[in-house]
């Protein structure tokens, strides 16, 4: 009976061995945390603006994108294969964003394009964080916040729409 439990214990340990040491655990937590935090900032701005995709949605998109690139890195996947993963993320988030776009034929208006573009950018920022490019992810987030928050105010003051 002890052999059975030992075998089960070994199998469970093997299943959870993808984070073999503190360094790998810290790297994973840092990259996922940065992705979630930056996605949360963008989502918080969208929530404050009364838009449909808020902080939780943006956090999940960013963290998901980061995880999709982190796992292949852990598996030492070739760069050529990783580019296919990235292409899949871009396409998948495009479909997610398309679901936020609404066209009203009666009013001849389209709503949700900025939300869709924001989700797409959030995924890109998540991938950037997942690939270990934290400074680039932070800079991209700051520029996105400027675009989302300040540009509309500048347009209004300039008399634009």
Image (cartoon, rainbow, N blue to C red):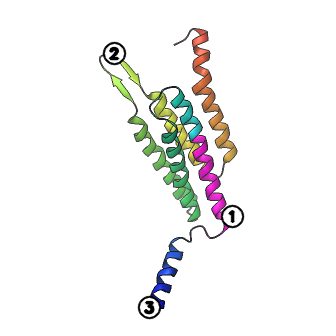
Q: Residues within 10 Å of mark 3 (few under 14, many from 20)?
A: few
Q: Which residue is mark 3?
A: 1
- What x and y, as percent, mark residue 81? 52, 58
User: In 3D space, how far apart are the residues under numbered discs 1 and 3 (Cα atoms)?
Assistant: 36 Å
| Lower sequence index among marks 2 and 3 | 3
Residue 48 visible (yes or no): yes
Please give the name of the residue rendered at 63% of the width and 47% of the height, measured from the top-left corner: 34
- Examine the structure image and report whether residue 133 is included in the region drawn in magenta: no
Residue 131 visible (yes or no): no
Horizontally, residue 112 falls left or right of residue 158, namely: left
Q: Nearer the viewer, mark 2 or mark 1?
A: 1
Disc number placed over residue 152 in the picture, else none: none
In terms of secondary structure, what is the magenta stretch mainly? helix
Q: Nearer the viewer, residue 34 or 5?
A: 5
Q: Considering the numbered disc 1 on the image, is that residue within a helix, a strand or a loop? A: helix
Horizontally, residue 14 falls left or right of residue 138, namely: left
Q: Which residue is mark 1?
A: 23
Please give the name of the residue rendered at 54% of the width and 60% of the height, measured from the top-left corner: 71
Tell me which segment is drawn in magenta: 19-39
Please give the name of the residue rendered at 45% of the width and 42% of the height, measured from the top-left corner: 93
Residue 101 vertical placement versus 66 (above, below): above
User: In 3D space, how far apart are the residues under numbered discs 2 and 3 (Cα atoms)?
Assistant: 73 Å
In the orientation shown, which residue stands out farthest toward the left?
106
In the orientation shown, which residue stands out farthest toward the top?
159
Q: Residues at badges 1 and 3 in contact (C-beta under 8 Å)?
A: no
Q: Which residue is mark 2?
A: 107
- What x and y, as percent, mark residue 2? 48, 90
Q: Considering the numbered disc 2 on the image, is that residue within a helix, a strand or a loop? A: loop
């Amino acid at each position: 009976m002890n052999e059975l439990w030992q075998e089960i214990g070994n199998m469970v340990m093997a299943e959870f061995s993808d984070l073999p040491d503190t360094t790998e655990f810290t790297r994973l937590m840092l990259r996922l945390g940065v992705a979630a935090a930056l996605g949360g900032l963008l989502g918080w701005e969208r929530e404050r603006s009364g838009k449909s995709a808020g902080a939780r949605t943006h956090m999940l998109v960013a963290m998901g994108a980061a995880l999709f690139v982190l796992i292949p890195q852990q598996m030492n996947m070739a760069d050529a294969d990783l580019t296919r993963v990235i292409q899949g993320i871009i396409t998948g988030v495009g479909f997610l964003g398309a679901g936020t776009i609404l066209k009203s034929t009666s009013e001849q208006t389209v709503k949700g394009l900025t939300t869709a573009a924001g989700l797409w950018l959030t995924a890109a920022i998540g991938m950037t964080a997942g690939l270990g490019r934290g400074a680039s992810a932070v800079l991209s987030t700051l520029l996105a916040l400027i675009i989302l928050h300040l540009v509309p105010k500048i347009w209004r003051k300039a008399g634009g729409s």
